[in-house]
Image (cartoon, rainbow, N blue to C red):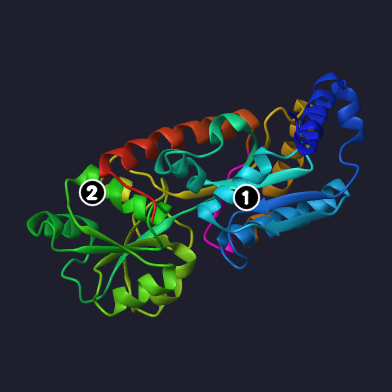
């Protein structure tokens, strides 16, 4: 039996398939667009979504409503977009967490890499590896040597089990042959508090959360997790400078339901990319420690596929389960 909701979805999908691309390009958007965020207001995802939403509203001349649907590590918001009509009016601000969840959760009601369509990448966020000033290692090489000499004696804190921060540490252990325990918290502030108190010895937390403590001399930055150095910490090396091929930055991008017409995807991609090259928006993201990553839908889809494979290896090898 086909429910009314399913009938509407099928009808929308059929309309999307038979409607000529030129018509979509001319008529889209004709109404409000919803941009769903899988986390509560105030965090990095929410801030990025509101910057993107404001730009799209001005560029497309239609309101873009940022809708927070927190829960299940973004899976609730993701499922809502997967089940939405493929017409370009319901979008998801996706991120590295979605790539991780593909393997972390054993029975999701959707396949992230198949049931959503990549629209455009937005930004990358580096994490920063920090220790307390009293820790007996002044640089990354010394930390690795110390950790190898004291296997199982150190604790890594993180914003939660299965987060990009947690897996940044797991990847680090895999690639350096070190071993330390993982202590999950309910957010960066709690993890940083316990690092300051000596309850944990190392964090791989987002740069914006850690920066005030680094500037105040309360935390020592050993390295950033991104492929290139952070503009806000130019003297701090990347982990990859000492551990070749290491990279574990967070990222965000926009996705649409599967079967969304290519003309709609193209319109959204062009509008987002225009914002990512706008000097004002680039500056706003830079102040957050993020770098923009404009590109085609195909390039963003390739990033999603590569990240999904990379984190699948880490999750399986570390036998990581959701909290």
Residue 322, numbered circle:
none
Describe residue 150's horizontal placement relative to residue 23 as left or right: left
Disc 1 crowd, CA 10 A, few/some/many (<14, 14-19, 20+):
many
Q: Residue at x 32, y 41 (%)?
A: 314
Q: What is the x, y in percent for residue 211? A: 44, 70
Find the residue positioned furthest to the front. Answer: 1
Q: Quadrant of the image for the N terminus?
A: top right
| Up-down relation of residue 173 to residue 183 (above or below) | above
Disc 2 crowd, CA 10 A, few/some/many (<14, 14-19, 20+):
some
Residue nearest the observer in this picture, 133 or 156? 156
| Up-down relation of residue 315 to residue 55 (above or below) | above
Please tell me whether residue 287 belongs to the stretch shown in magenta: yes
- Residue linked to disc 1: 77
Report if the CB atoms under discs 2 and 1 are less than 8 Å apart: no
Q: What is the x, y in percent for residue 304? A: 52, 35
- Residue linked to disc 2: 173
The quarter of the displayed image where residue 19 is located: top right
Describe residue 11's horizontal placement relative to residue 210 as left or right: right
Residue nearest the observer in this picture, 102 or 244? 102
Residue nearest the observer in this picture, 76 or 282? 76
Residue 157 can be seen in this image = yes
How far apart are labels 2 and 1 at the CA level?
31 Å
Q: Earlier in the sequence, mark 2 or mark 1?
A: 1
Residue 122 can be seen in this image = no
Q: Callout 1: helix, strand or loop?
A: helix
How many marks the image carries: the answer is 2
Q: Residue at x 37, y 44 (%)?
A: 247
Q: Callout 2: helix, strand or loop?
A: helix
Describe residue 97's horizontal placement relative to residue 200 as left or right: right
Which residues are drawn in magenta? 285-294
| Up-down relation of residue 121 to residue 213 (above or below) | above
């Amino acid at each position: 039996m086909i429910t009314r909701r399913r009938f509407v979805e099928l009808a929308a999908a059929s309309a999307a398939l038979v409607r000529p691309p030129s018509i979509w390009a001319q008529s889209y958007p004709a109404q409000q667009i919803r941009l769903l965020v899988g986390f509560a207001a105030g965090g990095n995802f929410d801030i990025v979504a509101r910057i993107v939403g404001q730009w799209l509203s001005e560029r497309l001349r239609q309101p873009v409503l940022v809708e927070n649907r927190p829960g299940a590590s973004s899976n609730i918001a993701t499922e809502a977009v997967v089940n939405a009509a493929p017409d370009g009016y319901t979008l998801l601000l996706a991120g590295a967490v979605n790539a991780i969840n593909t393997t972390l959760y054993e029975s999701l009601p959707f396949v992230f890499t198949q049931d959503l369509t990549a629209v455009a990448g937005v930004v990358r966020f580096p994490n920063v590896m920090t220790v307390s000033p009293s820790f007996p290692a002044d640089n990354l090489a010394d930390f690795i040597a110390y950790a190898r000499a004291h296997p199982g004696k150190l604790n890594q804190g993180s914003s939660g089990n299965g987060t990009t921060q947690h897996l940044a540490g797991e990847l680090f252990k895999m690639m350096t042959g070190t071993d330390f325990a993982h202590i999950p918290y309910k957010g960066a502030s709690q993890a940083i508090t316990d690092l300051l108190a000596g309850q944990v010895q190392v964090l791989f937390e987002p740069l914006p959360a850690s920066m005030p403590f680094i500037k105040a001399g309360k935390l020592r930055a050993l390295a950033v997790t991104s492929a290139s150095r952070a503009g806000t910490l130019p003297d701090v090396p990347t982990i990859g400078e000492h551990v070749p091929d290491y990279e574990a930055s967070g990222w965000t991008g926009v996705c649409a339901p599967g079967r969304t017409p290519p003309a709609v995807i193209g319109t959204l991609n062009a509008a987002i990319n225009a914002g990512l090259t706008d000097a004002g928006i680039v500056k706003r993201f830079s102040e957050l420690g993020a770098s923009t990553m404009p590109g085609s839908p195909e390039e963003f889809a390739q990033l999603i596929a590569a990240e999904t494979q990379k984190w699948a290896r880490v999750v399986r090898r570390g036998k990581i389960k959701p909290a």
